[in-house]
Image (spheres, helix red, strand yellow):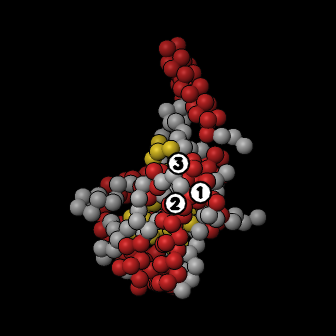
Amino acid sequence: MKTLSFYIKKTVELVFLAALCFCLGDSAARIGEQYPFITVSASADGNWGLSFQQEGKPPVANAPAEYLKQFNAYYINQTDEKVIYLTFDAGYENGNTPAILDALKKHQATATFFLVGNYLETSPDLVKRMVSEGHNVGNHTYHHPDMSKISTPQSFSKELQDLEALYQQVTGQPMKKYYRPPQGKYSESNLQMAKDLGYHTFFWSLAYVDWYEDKQPSKEDAFKKLLGRIHPGAVVLLHSTSKTNGEILDELLTKWEEMGYRFGSLDDLVSPAP
C-alpha cells in the first residue's frame, strides 16, 4: 500500500526535475506535458485543494485518488464517461433549497445533501422532502467544526453520531454513512476514524466560491466556472445557501445535459457496477 510520503517524495522529485529542465531550456516544456501536476503537493493534514490545468479535464488534487481509496475516501470517479455527481453542503436554510429541489426533480437528477445539526433542527420538512424525492443525505457533522483539530476517536465519533441520531429522529430512517469534512479540512487520522465508523468520505473535484451569502457570484461567473471546468466523473460541490445556485440550477443542468453529461449517484462510487 502506497503511503502519502510516497506521493510527496514523487512530487518533490518531479518539482526538482522541472526546475532543472527549466534551466536547460526547451526540456521544461516536455516535462510539463508529461507531468502537468508538478506544482501540486499532496497533503494528509490541511485543506482540500485542486489545481485546474486544462478545460474539460479533471483537476489535480492535493491527495491522489489511489491514496484516498485506502480510507474509503473519494473526490472523483476516474472514468471517461460523462457522468456528474451533484452534492450540496447545507449549513442552514435561507430559502434557496426548494428551487434547487425543483430543478433536480425536473431533470430527474439524484443529489447528495451534506447536512449539519442546525439544518435538521430548523428545516425538518425540507430534509423529509430530500429523502422522499430520492436524494441521499450525508453527514457534515453536528456543529461544523474543524475536524482536523479533533484528535480523539471519541470526540470525532460524537460529531457524526449525534447527527445520525437527529436524522433518524426526523426521518425515521438510519443515515447513510457518507461524510464530508467541514470546509474540506482533514487529516489522515480523521480519514481513518471515519473509515473505522463505517463511513465513506467525499471531497470534490469541482466547486466555486458560492458560499458568501452577501457576495454571491453573478450568473455569468458561475457558468464560466461550472461549464468550463466540468469533466468526466466530476463530484460537484455546491452550496444550497447560494441564491445564484437556486436561480441557475435548472439552466445549468440543461447546459450540462446538452454537453452530453448525465447525473449519477455517489452510491455508484461506493458500489460500482460490475
* Pointer 3 or 2: first along the chain: 2
Q: Secondary structure at mark 3?
A: strand
Q: CA gap, disc 1 to disc 2?
A: 7 Å
Name the residue rendered at 48%, 72% in the picture: 163
Could you tell me how far apart the alpha carbons at marks 3 and 1 are, in whole angstroms? 10 Å
Q: Which mark is residue 187?
A: 3
Mark identifier at residue 156: 2
Question: Is 199 left or right of 112, judged from the image as shown?
Answer: right
Q: Amino acid at mark 1?
A: Met
Find disc 1 in the rendering and name its residue. 193
Is the C-beta separation of discs 3 and 1 under 8 Å?
Answer: no
Q: Residue furthest right?
A: 274
Q: What's under tag 3, amino acid-wise?
A: Ser
- On the image, the x and y values in percent for residue 79 come to 64, 54
Whichever of callouts 3 and 1 sits on the residue coming sooner in the sequence is 3
Tag 1 near tag 2, CB within 8 Å? yes
Q: Residue at x 30, y 76 (%)?
A: 95
- Above/below status of 213 relative to 15: below
